Amino acid sequence: MNNLTDIFLAGNSSIITWLLMFATSFLGGIIASVSPCSLAMLPLMIGYVGGCSKETPFRTFIQLSCFILGTAIVFTVIGIICAITGSVFASAFGGYFTLIMASLLLVIGLKITNILDFEIPVIIKSMPKNNTSSLFLYPILLGIAFALAGTPCSTPILAGIMVFAAMGKNLAAAVIMLFLFAIGQGLILIIAGLFTSTFKNIKKFSNITDKFVKFSGWLIILVAIYLYYKVFSPLI
């Protein structure tokens, strides 16, 4: 237990802070998955990954789980990159690194709240064709492609979590944060895939989730302002 504690204390945050960030990362994944544009994509994604109208519920569950595993692989690698680059840049730039991260958070918050309107770059323009009945490999590859492509729904929230992972400069914690985001993002996909009749009920919550997403954007903006204050307060 002490060894595990030492791992998380290797960064500049306390255990309580990391536990809060883990919960926030998981919640961020859920928020990204239930935003209005994500809900609109659910029927297409489930049909594309598992063909829920043709497959048994168990087979659909396996395929969707493998899809989420594919996204988790990509996000885990992103977590490693964030932690390593965070440590490097923090050592090289000191307080400037915090200013850079605060600025990124501010832009992300303004994007989520729709104060700023700009397109999110997409790495992969189209998803691969489902010409195989593979139960494991194809859904994993599709999950990897989906994670690399990103969506306007999840990318701002994901970017915010990446910033926090980089600021924490803790490899193990950053990996867990991005992994939990992937699980949270995929949870609604599995539920909807197994209970497709819930689509109509889920869509009724679009207005509520849209407000919740914007609320999370305002929280990110407040965090950015706090970071600016921490940097500049000694000069006042």
Image (spheres, rainbow, N blue to C red):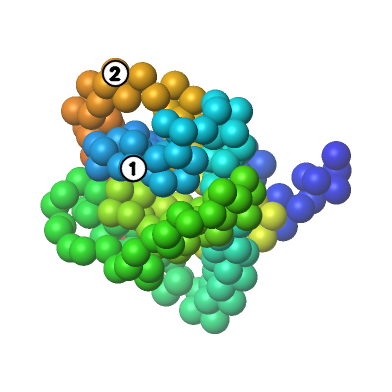
Q: Position of residue 117 (x, y in %)?
A: 14, 58
Residue 170: x and y, percent? 65, 59
Local crowd size for mark 1, using a 10 Å CA cut-off: few (<14), some (14–19), many (≥20): few
**1 and 2 marks in contact (CB < 8 Å):** no
Inspect this view and state whether residue 64 appears.
Answer: yes
Q: Residue at x 20, y 46 (%)?
A: 113
Which residue is at the far right? 2
* Residue appearing at x 30%, y 48% in the figure: 153
Residue located farthest toward the bottom when viewing the structure as drawn: 92
Residue that badge 2 annotates = 201
* Helix, strand or loop under label 1: helix
Q: Which mark is residue 113?
A: none
On the image, which quarter does residue 180 sit in?
Answer: top right
Disc 2 is placed on an element classified as: helix
Residue 44: give its label.
1
- 113 horizontally vs 142: left or right: left
The C terminus lies in which quarter of the figure? bottom left
As measured in the structure, the alpha-carbon distance from the residue carrying label 1 to the one carrying label 2 is 17 Å
Q: Amino acid at mark 1?
A: Leu
Mark 2 crowdedness (10 Å alpha carbons): few <14, some 14-19, many ≥20: few
